[in-house]
Image: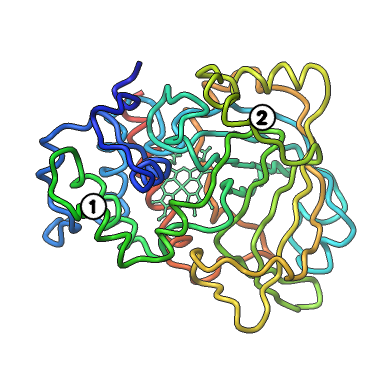
Amino acid sequence: MPALLRSTSFSITAMTLAVIALTTLSSYTSANAQTAAAPDASSNKPVTEQIVDSLTKLAGGPHAGYRANHAKGIVTIGEFVPAPSAASITKAAHLQRTASKVTVRFSNASGVPNIPDANGNGFPKGMAIRFDLPKGVSTDMVVISTNGFPVGTPEDFLTFLKAIEASGPGVAKPTPVENFLATHPATLKFVTMPKPAPVSFATQAFYGVNAFKFTNAKGESHFGRYRIEPLAGQQFLSAEETEKATPNYLMDELPVRLKKEPVKFRISVQLAEKDDAINDGTQVWPDTRKIVELGTLTLRSVHADGSKFEKGTMFNPLTLLDGIAPSDDPILLARPAAYAVSFGRRLSNP
Ligand code: HEM
């Protein structure tokens, strides 16, 4: 059993369980407990690199050749067919009438490469989609299985991770992470929301969380967030099934399912209304907001060399085509730099 799962290394309460479900606490030692809770203001590293360092530490890494977050995954291939309604909100080439080839990587959260699929540390699940267009052009969507993010800024993310690092066994209560959660209601809400284990990656919905600006051929713009729904419907394991799930049940199930039938998702965008926060992923928009269908994703098989592909690939939520632009959400704008640090380390230490 990996150190991560030895509950004796960490006092398990409902709150800490929820916290580790977000990030991953592995190889917890009393040395970690001495770490300062606040980000190191004197560090000359950018916040994004400090976040990657912290994610790596919390995962018991570095784990050579793996992502600092969403380390365990499976790569599939298929195609995307745009819906006629997509052109009403964006002129982006992959959302017009022509189908694109897609490569999709599903993943567990955390930087632990062998994390059991049903373990709370592996939530939220991830989905990264690359749309390949002619002439080597591509664009990515990188989404998670929760509608919302625990923090609104990279600085808060780093402070939160540092607080987790500093909240190991033997630390006086309230621990730094308890203090953080007491002062950050959106983070508390996120870490305590139910995150049930899906039956399959094919039965899990995913959310873009960060807003983008969509512009159509007439020059009309809307802010929106991606929603990706499984056509099989959302299906989750019971508590008993979750308990009994094998460590790789999700990674094992998908290839078997794909041999029998294609896996389909509907990709849509939820449009913001006037007062909706477009720069803060902790603010979930009401379900009553208009949803515009963008098209259908059909996955047909597992990638023939997924391991090589995932090592050599960095999905980037800001690799965008004309007709889709980033919002000024600071989390969205920070992501490419953090991903590049993780990717660079993966390439230089395979
Ligand atoms: C400041 C906020 C964030 C930081 C610092 C961060 C950090 C990271 C890092 C370091 C990786 C590994 C990238 C690689 O090595 O290729 C990663 C992967 C990933 N992140 Fe984030 N992330 C953030 C926010 C988000 C958000 C808001 C979402 C979704 C809405 C998200 C979804 C994912 C997914 C799905 C992956 C796996 C991508 C793949 O399969 O290659 N992340 N993240």
Q: Secondary structure at mark 1?
A: helix
State left or right for residue 231 relative to residue 109. right
For marks 2 and 1, give the CA distance: 33 Å
Crowd band around label 1 with a 10 angstrom C-alpha radius: few (<14), some (14–19), many (20+)? many
Query: Can you tell which quarter of the image residue 54 is in?
Result: top left
- Looking at the image, how many numbered discs can be counted on the residues? 2
Instruction: Report the amino acid beneath label 2.
Output: Val
Q: Earlier in the sequence, mark 2 or mark 1?
A: 1
- Disc marking residue 163: 1
Whether ligand 1 has any atom under 8 Å from the Cβ at mark 2 is answered as no
- Disc marking residue 199: 2
Q: Position of residue 239 (x, y in %)?
A: 57, 31
Instruction: Report the amino acid beneath label 1.
Output: Ala
State left or right for residue 96 relative to residue 275. right
Q: Position of residue 125 (x, y in %)?
A: 55, 39
Query: Can you tell which quarter of the image residue 9 is in?
Result: top left
- Disc marking residue 297: none
Q: Position of residue 160 (x, y in %)?
A: 30, 55
The correct choice, above or below, for 86 with respect to 230 in the image is: below
Whether ligand 1 has any atom under 8 Å from the Cβ at mark 1 is answered as no
The correct choice, above or below, for 151 with respect to 5 in the image is: below
Residue drawn at x 61%, y 66% is 212
